[in-house]
C-alpha cells in the first residue's frame, strides 16, 4: 500500500558548497545519486538542482559538472570572484531562492540541502505558499533558526552510511580546492 506522501512531488535544492563542508567535517565523500534517492524517500522527484561556485581558471570541475548534468541535476554555476584583499565569494543563495519559488506551483515538498541561516526567510515564504520545506544538513552546520522553522530536519550525519562512498576522506588528498581551501569538488 502506498503512503500519501509517496504522491508528493519533490524539488531538491543542493547548496553544493555547504554540502562540501558538511561532508568534509564528516570525513566522507558523497554519492550524489544515493543522497538524492535518500532525500526523495520514495516520493516523486520533480527536479534536482545543484548550485556550484566555480573558478573560471580551473577546468577540473568540468567532469563533475558534466556528471551531475548527465545524472538528472539542473546545474547552476557562478564564477568565484576574487577580491584585492584575497577573499573570495561565490554565493548562489539568490539563485537557489529564485528557483525554489519559481518551482513552488509544481512541487509539494522542497528539500534544501544546506544549513545556511540565510535561507530562513525563504523557508518561511515557501511555507506560506503551501510548500512543505525540509532541511538536510548536519546539526553543527545548521543555523538554529533554520532548524526551528523547517517542517522537517534531515540529519545527514545520522544517515551518512546510506550515501557515503566507501573509503574515508582526507580533505587535502581527496578533494580539489583552491589555495584557500575552498571548493566543492572531489578530485577527478
Image (tube, grey):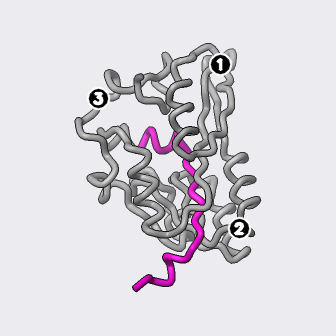
- Disc number placed over residue 106 in the picture, else none: 2
Q: Is disc 1 surrounded by few (<14), some (14 to 19) or many (20+) residues within 10 Å?
A: few
The residue closer to the viewer here, 167 or 113, is 167
The image shows residue 140 at horizontal and vertical percentages of 39, 53
| Residue 17 magenta | yes
Q: Which span is picked out in magenta?
A: 1-22
In 3D space, how far apart are the residues under numbered discs 3 and 2 (Cα atoms)?
40 Å
Q: Nearer the viewer's eye, disc 1 or disc 3?
A: 1
Q: Which residue is mark 3?
A: 170
Residue 19 lies in the magenta-colored region: yes
Quadrant assignment for the N terminus: bottom left
> How many dots with numbers?
3
Residue 115 vs residue 166: left or right?
Answer: right
Q: Measured from the top left, where is residue 76 in percent x and y?
A: 66, 39
Circle number at residue 56:
1
Element class at badge 1? loop
Q: Horizontally, is 92 left or right of 176 in the view?
A: right
- Secondary structure under badge 2? helix
Amino acid at each position: 500500500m502506498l503512503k500519501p506522501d509517496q504522491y508528493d512531488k519533490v524539488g531538491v535544492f543542493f547548496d553544493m558548497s555547504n554540502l562540501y563542508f558538511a561532508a568534509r567535517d564528516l570525513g566522507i565523500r558523497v554519492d550524489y545519486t544515493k543522497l538524492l534517492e535518500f532525500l526523495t524517500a520514495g516520493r516523486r522527484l520533480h527536479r534536482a538542482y545543484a548550485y556550484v561556485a566555480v573558478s573560471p581558471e580551473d577546468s577540473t570541475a568540468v567532469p563533475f559538472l558534466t556528471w551531475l548534468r548527465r545524472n538528472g541535476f539542473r546545474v547552476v554555476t557562478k564564477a568565484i570572484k576574487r577580491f584585492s584583499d584575497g577573499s573570495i565569494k561565490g554565493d548562489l543563495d539568490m539563485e537557489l531562492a529564485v528557483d525554489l519559488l519559481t518551482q513552488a506551483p509544481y512541487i509539494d515538498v522542497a528539500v534544501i540541502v544546506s544549513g545556511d541561516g540565510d535561507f530562513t526567510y525563504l523557508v518561511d515564504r515557501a511555507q506560506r505558499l503551501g510548500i512543505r520545506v525540509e532541511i538536510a544538513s548536519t546539526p553543527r552546520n545548521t543555523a538554529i533558526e533554520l532548524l526551528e522553522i523547517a517542517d522537517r530536519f534531515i540529519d545527514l550525519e545520522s544517515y551518512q552510511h546510506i550515501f557515503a562512498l566507501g573509503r574515508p576522506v582526507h580533505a587535502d588528498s581527496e578533494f580539489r580546492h583552491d589555495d584557500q581551501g575552498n571548493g566543492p569538488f572531489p578530485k577527478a
